[in-house]
Amino acid sequence: MKTLVIIISCMIICINNVMSQNVNGKVVNRNQQPVEAVTVVMQSEDSVFVDAVITDAQGRFVFDTGLKSFRLIFQHILYETISRDFNEPNVGVITMKEQNYSLDEVVIKGERPLVKAENGLLSYDVSVIAEKSSVSNAYEAVIRLPGVMEQDGGLQLVGAGSPTIILNGRPSSMTAEQLANLLKNTPVSNVEKAEVMYSAPAKYRVRGAVINIVLKKNKSEEPLLRGEVGGNFTQGIYSRGGGNMSMSFSGEKLSADILYSADYSKIKSSNDFISHHTLGDKVYDISQYNTGNRQRLTHNMRASIDYRITDDDNLSVAYTSAISPNSKSTENSNGTLSESSNIRTGDEQMHNFSADYTSGWGTNVGVDYTYYAYPSVQNFTDKSSRKEQKFILNSSQYVNRWNIYAGQTHALPKGWSVNYGINFSFANEKSLQKYTPADGTDMSDMNSSSNLEEKTYNFYGGFEKSFNEKLSLSMSLAGEYYRLADYTDWSVYPTMQLSYVPSAAHIFQLSFSSDKTYPDYWDIQNSVSYLNGYSKVLGNPQLRPSTDYIADLTYVLKSKYMFSVYYTHIKGLFGQLAYQSPDELVMIYQSVNYDYQRNFGISAIIPFTIGSFWNSRITLDGSYFRHVCRDYHGIGFDNSVWRGVAMINNTFTLSSKPSISLELNAMYVSPSIQGNYDLSSIWKVDAGLKWIFANRNAEFRLTGNDLFNTATPNATVNDRGQRFEIIQHADSRYVSLSFTYRFGGFKSKERKKVDTSRFGY
């Protein structure tokens, strides 16, 4: 760390400490009247695109980051294009002449950059992504960001693990599934940009890798009502579908929106479990074939009000709920050991209330409350040559969680910015398991209950400094006191981002982050749950949070080509693993802490286009993984592997009028590891067809996911007497049809997500 500080200090000393200034000016016509909606494009001296803005109602424009010497191009359909070179931040008044339409048509072609560096982060122009792909909503835009991919039901950022998604710079508390549903209902036209931070500053109140979705602000001098209705149908092994409707009101001061969506899902689960189980001096060959399904109807509701006190002061209040009554999962297991039936029914609900205030002097305060409830009943039957078992299990989990935060940012002279704040979280979790056997046997020793109190006190401080238009630095330090039952921990988390932009064609970014990840509440209970006649899940009260460290060096060439080198070290990484019990013929699943996980690698992202018909992007990643857990039920492991990932995303423009595009994507992941598991390679092919019509208000989409049903890995363990194989038959191949219609100039508002990621069982 000392070496890193010395390097940073030397770089700072070697570069002039010149305060970067905003480039600003005003555009008028020959009558000295302001001209609104003029596109102002900034280029470097060598004609490389830097940024673009649009003039406001007074004809004014401002670029946040300026160059010492630059070129500005002024474009408007009613006026002649102007191109001038400047070397001062205040360009003064620009007078535009009316266009003479008797001249031949002039067509100006240019390519906007996909990515640029802004204040220590990588900012992606989502409109460029939308133009060059078939994306229609914010979620699809996120998964098409360079280096982002869907894996194991979540998002992964190459070299940084699972990123946290935030909206408009504010963290929230929604599950990954709820956030995905929210973003899928947010039109891509309402997303201004996506910001990727491999090391988020402490002021965001989240640590580690972050993707910030910046939504366009809704404000209207005249009252405006907008809306959207849509529906979708998906055919996999089973049919599923849903519908949504949204209404929003925008005024000069007040805006409000309401959202309702209903999603019905029924998904098949299936796997073959082949086990060579050593018990005493004998090896038992066990084959169990497990099939089942999970089905639920979820009602998502959202209502929010935003009041713009002044242009810089805003108050937001929101209510969010997700209710899944009568959810049901079943699993039938048949094989050489047993025949079992497992049916679980439950009612799951989440309610969240939040209030947030942001002031023009840099203050942000808020409160967030979440209530979660999930009572369920499990009906279990097992018949085997050894025994017969039948019982009813009543389980429940109730969570009340408060989050209170306050932060302050000060803009200081000479490019300095200082931020500091607090973030307090308080949670109470109550859970219960009660077994009722059908034959009257005593199972009371398996009953469990808990009443956990969790408290987290977080204090942070940091600074940002722009030394000139080439070099910027962001550093922060967060201190945290954490207490869960009798476990307490003091931790300190440093973060750093250093950006160096020698020219508009070259961007270098060095980042370092540290973070803590917390296990689910249910995983730390002293609980026992049966999956089938051979498998059960044990809780682990000794499970502890993990500490993550990530370092990344990224180079961006010509705002398109990206290359990165990265290293991660996760101390105490936790995950659920399986092992064959040495005491009985039972496969036990349990979440445990590893000693550590290490991963280092290199990646390259290379986009290319062929005419206006074919747009493509290739992603290549090679990395080394090592998972170490020396104390794991006497069968500790030290597992390592080299893994390669290759992805290609293609969009073919079949027609511009009408707008019809075809998307074809493919991915390959070489064999990998997960704890003591050896995972097989996977590959995947997706396709999609999008048709936009009715003055771009209506959209029809046909998509096919995992067309060859090859995207789920199989797992094998053959080490220290443990020998078993899990062959997956996932329900990942499906075809979807969706239709969306927007009316009244619909723009979906920002909706804060609710974090229930640690709830449920």
Image: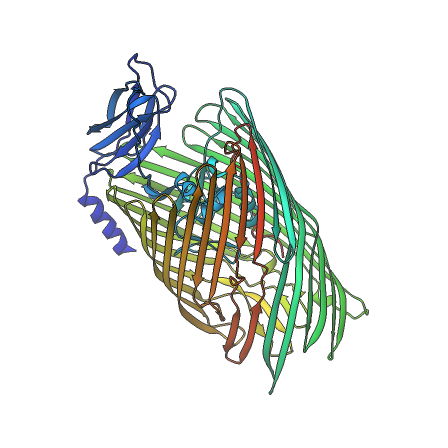
Residue 760: x %, y % from top left: 62, 54
Residue 321 in view of the camera? no
Rendered location of residue 280, percent (x, y):
61, 85
Residue 277 in percent (x, y) is at: 60, 80
Q: Where in the figure is residue 294, as x and y percent of width and height?
A: 66, 57
Colouring scheme, one of rainbow, by chain, secondary structure, one colour: rainbow
For this rendering, which residue is in front, 384 or 202? 384
Q: Is residue 343 above or below residue 70?
A: below
| Residue for point 28% across, 18% down | 97
**Residue at image location 41% in from the left, 57% down from the top:** 647
Q: Quadrant of residue 709?
A: bottom right
Q: What is the quadrant of the N terminus in the image?
A: bottom left
Q: Residue furthest bottom?
A: 281
Which quadrant would the C terminus be assigned to in this image? bottom right
Q: How many marks?
A: 0
Taking the image as drawn, is residue 590 in sight?
yes
Q: Residue visible at 66% across and 59% down?
A: 293
Point out the residue furthest to the top here. Answer: 31
Residue 437 is left or right of residue 470, and the answer is right
Q: Is 400 positioned to the left or the right of 469 in the image?
A: right
Along the line of sight, the residue nearer the viewer: 56 or 23 = 56
Say if 607 sits above or below 601 in the image: above
